[in-house]
Structures are given as structure tokens and as C-alpha cells.
Amino acid sequence: MDEKNRIDTLNNIKIFTGNANPTLVKKVCEYISIPLGNALVGRFPDGEINVKINEDVRGSDVFIIQPTCPPVNENLTELLILIDCFKRRQQLE
């Protein structure tokens, strides 16, 4: 892969995460020099998971880094909701 294609590929990557291990994701993003995507993964007052993607991901290669370490149910649910959010967003764009 030549340098131009490598740069184009890196510019096309977006990385997102849930709340499982923000330190890991920060280190990964620093290592590959790609900023973390702008998304809110929080909780509604009733405890349900709230995900909001705050940037355009159209035409991008989206990677979600979300370990499933304990508490497994919460972390896995966040991951599944993130995946669903991106799939639905892709269908709308």
C-alpha cells in the first residue's frame, strides 16, 4: 500500500467506545493517531442505556472498542446498542 492510500484509509477510520475501559481506548487512539469518535454513552434516569452519535460517519469505517469484562451484562449491552445505533444510522444516510 502506498503512502497516499495509507493516509486515505486512516482518514476514513472512526473509533468509538462505550464505558467499559476508556483508558484502553485512549491508549489505542493515541497509538494509531486517530481521535476518538464523538458519541455519548450514558444512562437515562431510569437506568436504561442512552447512546447518541454526535458526528457524521457516512462513508467511514467504524470500529467499536468495547471490552466485555465485568460487569459483563452492562458492557455487552452497551456494545450491542452501539452496533445497533450505527447500523440504523447507516440505513438513514
Image (cartoon, rainbow, N blue to C red):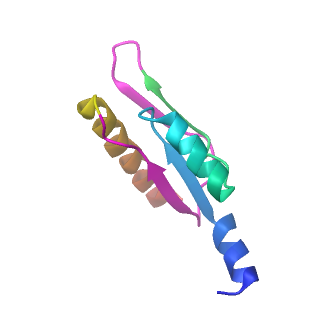
Query: Which image quarter: residue 45?
Result: top left
Task: Point out residue 71 in the picture as x, y percentages from the top left corner.
Answer: 28, 28
Task: Please report the residue visible at 45 percent of the width from the left and 32 percent of the height from the top.
Answer: 19
Whether 16 is drawn above or below 11: the answer is above
Nearer to us in this view, 93 or 61: 61
Query: Which image quarter: residue 5?
Result: bottom right
Whether 58 is drawn above or below 86: the answer is below
Q: Quadrant of the N terminus?
A: bottom right
Whether 70 is drawn above or below 93: the answer is above
Magenta stretch in the rendered image = 44-69
Q: Residue furthest top?
A: 45
Q: Is residue 44 left or right of residue 61?
A: left
Q: Residue furthest bottom?
A: 2
Nearer to us in this view, 49 or 21: 21
Task: Point out residue 13 in the picture as x, y percentages from the top left corner.
Answer: 60, 62
Task: Point out residue 47 in the picture as x, y percentages from the top left corner.
Answer: 34, 17
Task: Please report the residue visible at 63 percent of the width from the left and 54 percent of the height from the top.
Answer: 31
Tell me if residue 61 is in the magenta stretch: yes
Task: Please report the residue visible at 69 percent of the width from the left and 56 percent of the height from the top.
Answer: 33
Q: Is residue 23 left or right of residue 76?
A: right
Asked if residue 89 shows in the view, the reply is no
Q: Is residue 12 left or right of residue 78?
A: right
Q: Residue furthest right?
A: 4
Magenta: main secondary structure = loop
Task: Please report the residue visible at 54 percent of the width from the left and 36 percent of the height from the top.
Answer: 23
Tell me if residue 32 is in the magenta stretch: no
